[in-house]
Image (cartoon, rainbow, N blue to C red):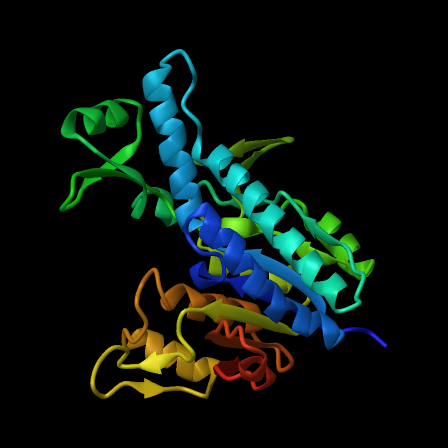
Amino acid sequence: MRKKKIVIALGHDALGTTLPEQKSATKRTARAVADFVRDDYQVAISHSNGPQVGMIHTAMAEFCKIYPEYTATPMSVCSAMSQGYIGYDLQNAIRTELLNRGIYKPVSTILTQVCVDPYDEAFYTPAKVIGRVMTKEEAELEEKKGNHIMETETGYRRIVAAPKPVDIVEIDAIRALLKADQIVIACGGGGIPVLAQEHRLKGASAVIEKDLAAGKLADMIDAERLIILTGVEKVCLNFGRENEIPIDEMTTAQAEKYMEEGQFEEGSMLPKIEAALEFIGNSAVRSVLITKLDTSEEERKEITGTVIRK
């Protein structure tokens, strides 16, 4: 009998921010992932990397300030670094949790490149803030290099584009590992954004929304469900107001209506809803669960959240 495939998209809460926080958070996250493995699902995992890639970018920028003879590190390389060390902590935590339960199942991290369209509108209107706060002089130097800068309350910050994912380069490797009943960690941080230039892949100065990449991954492995773990238990209308309304279930048509009404915040819930709609499409089988990561055994027995279906 064919196992059901799911993609679990881990948010910031599942990973922490600092290195010690990440070590601790991945242990808690591993318990939730192991529950799905125990229930005989084929599991692929994607994750955020916001604080981590920002830390790497800042560290490498500071390194180049001290040693000018070294070339600045592109965003695509920073993204690859974040996939490596987040995947390292995640796969070891999941492996340990499974072995503690008497389950032997390999866990692998795939360094994943995700193709984007060079003509995506996002490249003309970059808005994703990355890296450290800069002085005016430093910002001017960055602009001379061709990078985009914006002024904030605390100083100047670099901004990059957030194009939509078009294709996953390593999808055949991911499918092969899943077919072998292994757990796969892929598309970390939205994937390493690349531009296809004939037979060559060129790293793009961009960041892909990790929820959209998770939806693309779920679509390309033909998963039945996409589970987006976030900091809130349910999607809400009028979020943060006195008349806030939690949603248990909604159709894709309702989700589209709420989007048009501006119910979902950009950079927060909106990309999750967009990912859900992209993944479900016209399928009557696929569904999306948006929920909070619960770490106690009692809480994990009853999964709550918002379910989205056609």
* Residue 56 quadrant: top left
In the image, residue 200 above or below residue 31: above
Residue 258 shows in the view? yes
Residue 286: image location, x then y, percent: 62, 77
Which residue does the image show at 32% across and 20% down from the upper left? 65
Position of 105 with respect to 125 (left or right) is: right
Q: Position of residue 29 (x, y in %)?
A: 56, 64
Image coordinates for residue 274, horizontal then vertical, percent = 44, 67
109 left or right, relative to 54: right
Number of marks drawn: 0
Farthest-out residue, right: 1
Q: Residue at x 83, y 58 (%)?
A: 180
Please tell me whether residue 300 is drawn above or below residue 115 in the rendered image: below
Residue at the spot x=36%, y=42% of the render? 123
26 or 193, which lies in front? 26
Does residue 215 appear in the picture of this structure? no
| Image coordinates for residue 9, horizontal then vertical, percent | 54, 63
Relative horizontal placement of residue 85, taking residue 182 as reference (left or right): left
Q: Quadrant of the C terminus?
A: bottom right
Could you say which quadrant of the image residue 266 lies in? bottom left
Q: Quadrant of the N terminus?
A: bottom right
